[in-house]
Image (tube, grey):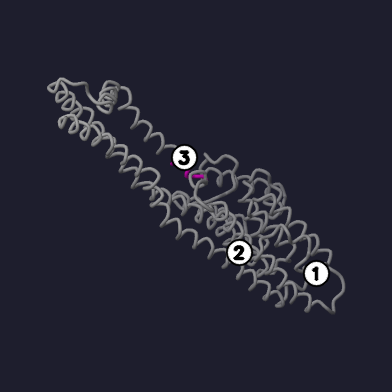
Amino acid sequence: MDPITLDRILALNDELSALAAAGVPVDLGQTIPSRSVGEVLEEAGASIALRQGRGMTLEQAVADNPDLPAGYRSALAASLKSSRLTTALETLCRPAVALAEVRHTLGRALMGPLVVVTFAYFGFLFLCLFVIPTFTDQYRQLGTEPSSSVRMLVAMRQWLPYWAPLVPLLLLAAVVRWRRGARTDRPARWLPSFKRYKTAVRDAQLADNLARLVQQNVPLAEALRWSSHMTGQPTMIEAAERLAVAIERGETVTPDHPDLAGLPPVLRWALVAGQDSLARANATKDGPDQAIANTQTSEHWPLVNNLKFAAQTYHQQIRRRGKFWRVAAPADGILLLAGPVTLAYALCLFEPLVQLWRDLAR
């Protein structure tokens, strides 16, 4: 396998910039979301090149570089450990794509209610401009006082120059705010079980990266550290660090190990079952260093398979919740937004008409 060089990293940055420009979500973990991915990656490449030019190794120029976005730095450092730049590419794109799919599902679900609200708005304008004068003429010919609903609509007609331009402006502001918020997970937070969906995305990312690093002969303790840093979750990083320290001390990871508590359940099972096979392989060895070294032999394959199974389990959870939202989100949009607007428009149209018929009958 060819060693990773600065030129290959710069080529990766160009690929990520092209993906972002094409609309593929790329999450670098940057602190200023408004900046474009291309600008951030250009500055990141220049910073790595500058540090390497000062005599640092490529690993030091990446791992100890505070100028790099957190997610990008962790993913790139893990790629250097595994000698596979595809690790960074998958880490930076796959979770972001999973969250973007939810936002797109929600956006498509809101298109129907938005169309209904638009038609109701123009229908209400027609009602105020052309229908209400007819109602008032009928009551004038009858010589009676207009009904309360007609009086309310007459008042709305008088205030029409004020509220008529306001509604399109509010709709436009809502669309603009949506598009700005689409870069984050804010629009989808109200979805049921969205928090669990984000947790499954994070857990799948952790299991995927951990399996990939261990498969590339990265020691398990070090793989835990880098995989947890790639999730960007402080609690996950702290839990993985405690477990990594325990593994480096030569402790056997058992189901009741206290440092497993902060990790996802299926991942805990994968680590325990995989470590059982490593413990059997290391039974005749002495010292934690030798035990860690043996994770770079063929005995680590049961652990890799277990980690891949854990990742598949979390990916199935992600797909299952995505399918549910594709069905439930449009129905909820119709029920919560389009339904009340349609009902209000129908009442404004038919209630004055029914009341007029009653007055004519009397």
Percent position of residue 184, x then y: 52, 45
Q: Is residue 92 left or right of residue 111?
A: right
Check disc 1 and report its element: helix, strand or loop: loop
Seen in the picture, residue 330 relative to 218 is either above or below; the reply is above
Q: Nearer the viewer, residue 338 or 73?
A: 338
Q: Earlier in the sequence, mark 1 or mark 3?
A: 3
The quadrant of the image that shows the N terminus is bottom right
- Residues in magenta, as a range: 178-184
Q: Earlier in the sequence, mark 3 or mark 2?
A: 3
User: Label 1 belongs to which residue?
Assistant: 252
Check disc 2 and report its element: helix, strand or loop: helix
Q: Quadrant of residue 269?
A: bottom right
The disc at residue 20 is none
> Is 247 inside the magenta-drawn segment?
no
Q: Is residue 299 left or right of residue 141?
A: right
Seen in the picture, residue 283 relative to 90 is either above or below; the reply is below
The answer to the question of whether label 1 and label 3 lie on touching residues, with beta carbons closer than 8 A, is no
Residue 140: tell me if it is visible.
yes
Q: In percent of the image, x 65 and y 72: which residue is there? A: 306
Q: CA distance from mark 1 to mark 3?
A: 48 Å
Q: CA distance from mark 1 to mark 2?
A: 22 Å
Dot 1, crowdedness within 10 Å: few (<14), some or many (≥20)?
A: some
Q: Nearer the viewer, residue 66 or 291?
A: 291
Percent position of residue 118, x then y: 30, 39
| Amino acid at pointer 1 | Thr
Percent position of residue 165, x then y: 31, 27
User: Label 3 belongs to which residue?
Assistant: 180
> Is 181 inside the magenta-drawn segment?
yes
Q: Nearer the viewer, residue 333 or 233?
A: 333
Percent position of residue 22, x then y: 43, 51
| Amino acid at pointer 3 | Arg
The disc at residue 208 is 2
